[in-house]
Image (spheres, rainbow, N blue to C red):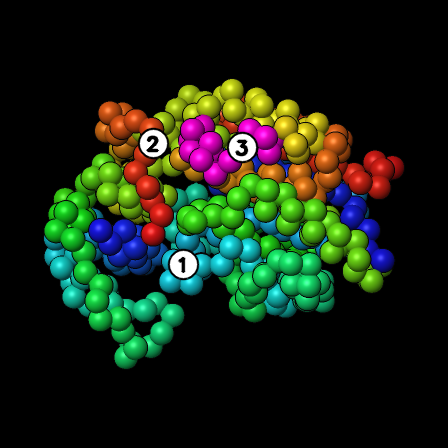
Amino acid sequence: MSKYLLDKFLFTVDRDPELVERYREDAAGTVSWWEEEMANRILNCTTGEKSTWQQLTDEERTALREHNHVALFELGAHPFLTLTLFIAMFERDHGPLEYQQAYGKAMEHLTLPYPDIAT
Amino acid sequence: MATVAAVIASTHHPFYYRASTSTGADRPPFADEWVAKIEAFRETLTKARPDILVMVGSDHFHQLWLDNMPQFLVGKAPYFDANWYNEEREFGLPRMTLPGEERLAGHILRNGLDAGFDLAFSNELRIDHSITCPIITLRPDADLPIVPIYTNIFAPPLPRPQRFVELGRTIRQLVESWPDDKRVAIIGTGHLSLELGGPRQFGAHGPDPEFDRKAVEWIASGDVEGCLAEVTLDSLHLPGNATHGFMDFMLMMGVAGAGAKADHVDSLDLFHTMEAYFTWYPNGVPE
């Protein structure tokens, strides 16, 4: 499990308008590029001072490549990050609140306690 | 010595700005009632004639991140830029720049450390909607210097509810021990029951109206002990997965003091979440 890295993907994409569009249009390509170039970047350091060990699990990578917000929730990704980014990508294709309500309905089989989001 | 001119606790609804400024077909049916309630709430701050605002909120993964996450942080800077690209994108919030009150921030840091709170600090903090929403609702001219204080209600492990109450009590004491002859309003925002990114989000009401009813009663009556007896880090998962933001209300109950009945109480049942507004005047209701 690398919940931290899942969250780091969502965080770094959500705050960058170009990456939001790139992830919407080409999820698999963006995830591959991100894991290669960005996963080991320490965000508050220069690019020369990288980590060496960050890697998504196969399950996490698949959830990101498939834009699967239900799987991301089940894997313990921070739900605020997932929701915010997915609204940015997909709300535009729906009527007012339609996307947010469908997003919740897709998870109605989930019961408490929800997956732990602690990193 | 400084005077606590008002203590204010509020929800911070990022959609208020858009709802209140929209017109015609874009204006939601609840906007007029919402604006009327906010204007009455704003008057409770205006008539307190504050010089400085201490603003308690919580960064939503904008500047603070999991590689270096403080539990409690005080902003000490001459200015604070505000609102972020993804808040403009989702909520239509405007970019802002607010003046800071560095001397009070320094006093809170020094004496907070000495009082047993290992407060983090930031000398370059871009604040988010947890602080700009109450600026927009309560002081839209954004003309007063602020001291922002961030709490972690967002990235577990979190401090326990008791710690939020204790920090609130300490902030009250720290403001009252500041030597400057200023009128300080202490304003904090959080949530009642709230679900974000889970199956109970964006319903016709908040996810747990019964929790909301009890929460309003705890806050309005200053029932700190009753609230602490029922609210734990574990219990806050039940009303909705983002309900840990209620701990910022508990902090403000600590500021107001045990048994302190709020002088202004209002609420508004909206889709997705309930709004709630509280004002206390520790030194008497201003004329």
| Residue at the spot 85% in from the left edge and 37% down from the top edge | B284
The structure residue drawn at horizontal position 60% and vertical position 38%, both measured from the top left corner, is: B249
Q: Is residue B234 magenta?
A: yes
List the residue tagged with mark 3.
B231
Looking at the rendered structure, the kind of residue marked 1 is: Trp
Indicate the chain on which mark 1 is placed.
B
The magenta segment is B227-240
Task: Report whether B251 appears left or right of A70.
Answer: right
Observer able to see residue B282: yes
Image vertical order of residue B100 relative to residue B229, above or below: below
Spatial CA span between label 1 and label 3: 26 Å
Q: Amino acid at mark 2?
A: Pro
Pointers 1 and 2 in contact (C-beta within 8 Å): no
- Examine the rendered structure and indicate whether residue A60 appears above or below residue B65: above
Q: Nearer the viewer, residue B98 or B2?
A: B2
Q: Mark 1, mark 3: which one is toward the viewer?
A: 3
> Considering the numbered disc 3 on the image, is that residue within a helix, a strand or a loop?
loop
Q: In this rendering, would B188 be left or right of B233?
A: right
Residue A113 is marked as: 2
- Of residues A94 and B200, the one nearer the viewer is B200
The chain carrying label 3 is: B
Report the residue that reaches farthest toward the bottom.
A48
Residue B65: mark in rendering? 1
Q: Residue A61 versus residue B88: which sits nearer the camera?
A: A61
Q: Residue at x 59, y 55 (%)?
A: B149
Secondary structure of the residue carrying tag 2 is loop
Quarter holding the C terminus of chain B is top right
